[in-house]
Amino acid sequence: MAEFMTETEQRSAAVPHPGMAGGRRGRTGDAVADPNEEPPERHPDGRLEGQEAVALLERTRALVDPELRAALESLPGSMRRIALYHFGWQHADGSPATGNAGKAIRPALVLAAASALGGAAARTAAVRAAVAVELVHNFTLLHDDVMDRDTSRRHRPTVWSVFGDADAILAGDALQALALRLLAEDPHPAAGPAAVRLADCVVELCAGQHADTDLERRAPEEVGLDEVLAMAEAKTGALLGCACALGALYAGVGQEEVAALDGFGRQAGLAFQLIDDVIGIWGDPRHTGKPAGADLAARKKSLPVVAALSSGTQAAAELAELYAKPYISGDDEGIARTALAVDRAGGRDWAQAEAADRMAHAVQELSRAVPAPETAGGLLALAEFVTRRTS
């Protein structure tokens, strides 16, 4: 007997799953949050969903920020001012600010992986590595904002829009150099292998960004879901995988465990990117700090968009027609129509289902290195957090 499906399920089923003939929905039954949903519920023990991750992120900032601030203060005056502005610690005129330095998800993964495999001593030893990962992440943000012409990040103007393209690019270069210097000066025996892995990761990040810019130059019908997923793994999954692997290296475990942690981070990173793309279309600007539908205005070939275009539905044809036209500034109605077309073609449903699948794969990878769930709690909490966030 044929399975009965709702209209929404039919749209989602029409979207092909990468590598699967005829496509599949890719659902695991795991819940993945809508970016505009109500706050998460409490567990039976009274603990708020996501509370553990928030506490981990706060502890990470407390451990990482002093070392991060010291690294930035070592920069020459002009670069220091730009870097401190980017991290929210100064205004553009150089006066002190108490802004938003970011969520610290990547350094938190370094420390959580070190703790899960090596305990508190390994976590303390890995602080420099965590700072290095955060510096690399922010180097990519500075460069991405220039290439994407994004004018807002963390609820304030982007560096290039304030200081110009050249200064933003140079500041990003300086952050990358600081990251490698931190590891070069670290006496821990894992610092050398960590530096090599981080350098390899930067190369992969650059390859992912190159793939992204190449995709943007191509017509929507020329872009396949498989290659967008591969781009997302290189551009986003690689650094989350590297963060987890660096934590494992500082815990002193073997290569098999390091590889498993890298796999965990990569799969969690893909889930992160899928939800990020959903937020980029349907997120609330009050939470995201970016205009509503910014990715659609830029005609980005994000994962929900490419999935929707691949669905073969009438809504997909409408979306292709809309994407073929340049965005006219201030056309909020056009953005709303485009977002609705992505939704009707199953793009949002597919992205949320695929994120749940990727998280299931991440948990499988994690169990190879950390079989005891109680030991892996921090990593699991952070992985869950990235798929339940709203900004």
Image (tube, rainbow, N blue to C red):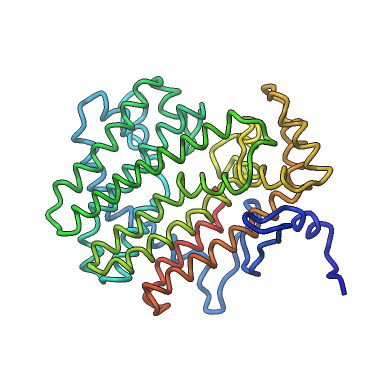
Q: Nearer the viewer, residue 151 or 317?
A: 317
Q: Position of residue 254 (x, y in %)?
A: 26, 69
Task: Name the residue at 40% across, 21% down.
Answer: 165
Q: Is residue 110 left or right of residue 276?
A: left
Q: Position of residue 378 (x, y in %)?
A: 40, 67
Q: Position of residue 322 (x, y in %)?
A: 75, 31
Q: Is residue 143 left or right of residue 73?
A: right
Task: Name the residue at 20% across, 48% down.
Answer: 183
Q: Nearer the viewer, residue 76 or 15?
A: 15
Where 292 falls versus 241 (above or below)? Answer: above
Q: Which image quarter: residue 285?
A: top right
Q: Is residue 88 left or right of residue 333?
A: left
Q: Position of residue 241 (x, y in %)?
A: 39, 56
Q: Quadrant of the N terminus?
A: bottom right
Residue sticking out furthest to the left:
187
Q: Is residue 208 left or right of residue 90?
A: right
Number of numbered discs on residues = 0
Residue sticking out furthest to the right:
1
